[in-house]
Amino acid sequence: MGTTILALPWELLSTILEAATSSNARSIQNYTYGVDTTSNGKSQRILRGQVAHDALRWLSTDSIRHVNRQWHDWAVHYALRDLYIRRWRGSERWIQSRALDSVHVHPSKDIVYRDPYCSLKKTVGLFNNYPALASSVRRIFFDGFYGVETGLMIFQILQKCDRLDTVSLPWTMLRYGSEEDWAHLLRRRGNGTVLSSLELLAVDLKQAQITDFTRQVDKKPLNSSRVNFGQLKRIKLSGSSNLMPINDDDLVSISRTARLHEVHITGTTAITTRGLLALTRASRNTLTLIEHSPLSDDGFKHPDAVSETDGRHLCEEIVNCPHLSSLAVSLPSICRDLFSETSIKWTGDVQIRAAGVCGLGSLKSTANAQHAFFNILSQARSLIQVQKVRDIELNIEIFINHLIFEPAKSLVHADLSIGELLSGGSWPSWQEPSSKGPYGQTGQYGKDEQAYSCISEDEFVEGLQKGYITF
């Protein structure tokens, strides 16, 4: 008797079903459409955007769900593995036609109302009625829900997801969530699973939302000893807000129990190196990645202007993380200590952004600081060579204000237009176009920036001495 597909090992069957699902996804319409009015008064179909990934996963498993119970359960688990719950935005109007490609009438003035929180409410009802579905969720993302009432619904959903691995929440949940809510989310569950990744995303709210007294709520869950971040491996804090933003005190509270592997802090204004230092010290023996890129007006000014906090040196703390391999950090100042330890495990691209040298102040004001900085570049080159001997590729970039230094190539990337004018075209003697801008490979920042060029460090020193260029 021949073997049927149902008799195959579960691992092999899952691989086949996933390949079939991927094939189905390619044949499904991946974009949504709407109707717009042209200048001559006619209506036409327009492309609105891509179908959401979770919706696409559900549609691509539709045929598989109808085969048998086993395949149905696999399809549901696959479709609900990643769940994106968004607040509905915008408005729609009725149009009196069924054929969008031949619409020649004006849309109705009647607005089609939709509850902006409909998706959130329906998810709460679905998981309450069918809790087994919630067990399929591994990653869940909430977008656009910043109020107290929606916060209660979010935690109702999270309580049902007993195998959740990653969650992305609005930052307000750190204020509106109770001690019980956060203790339940971060606990080790009865099935042995834990939450490993937490993302808190912040945005600026409208003035009316900020002044609404019902939003001025802070239940202070971090003050409770029951809220334990010890099982969490990754934390990401992204964005800035004008309503109760996450700050250094919050990170200090988190650090009391944290044993993190990855720390991502990007686009923030309320978090300084004090908060970063607290997390780094608490997770020194487990950290493998640090990303710290605070928000600023010009890309190089940082909220924190203090080189040391509580007498502890951040450069030394970073170097003392024995498992750290990926680093992209903004510091008020740097020193040789950052590149002095040859036993470090850094690999790939390492980016350091700073404004001065530890203990010597700004590079714009003192010759001692400038001399020390060139010694730092030499130390970085030595570290790169040590890693090269070990067959480890390490590329270090140091950002100082508007300048980018590549120690491995002894190159400096900058806007040289003013220096060329001051020197009458005699400096620099050699340059070539650079693809780097104030944010590295991401291009230029601001409308007034000129194209960057790269020159040698020797050319830079000459220009610095003659006043053609400054730090």
Image (cartoon, rainbow, N blue to C red):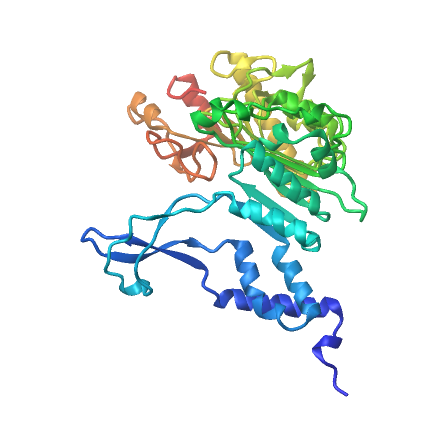
How far from the left and from the top, in percent, is residue 299?
46, 28
Classify 162 as above or below 430. below
> 241 or 281, which is in the foreground?
241
Image point 67% across, 49% down: which residue?
A: 128
Image point 68% across, 64% down: which residue?
A: 74
Q: Is residue 2 left or right of residue 59?
A: right
Q: Quadrant of the N terminus?
A: bottom right
How far from the left and from the top, in percent, is residue 156?
66, 41
How far from the left and from the top, in percent, is residue 197?
67, 41
Image point 52% across, 22% down: which residue?
A: 213
Kindly give the residue lying farthest to the left in the view shown: 40
> 292 or 145, which is in the foreground?
145
Image point 30% across, 59% down: which residue?
A: 96
Q: Is residue 295 left or right of residue 20?
A: left
Quadrant housing residue 225:
top right
Q: Quadrant of the C terminus?
A: top left
Quadrant housing residue 105:
bottom left
Kindly give the residue lying farthest to the bottom in the view shown: 1
How far from the left and from the top, in percent, is residue 10?
74, 68
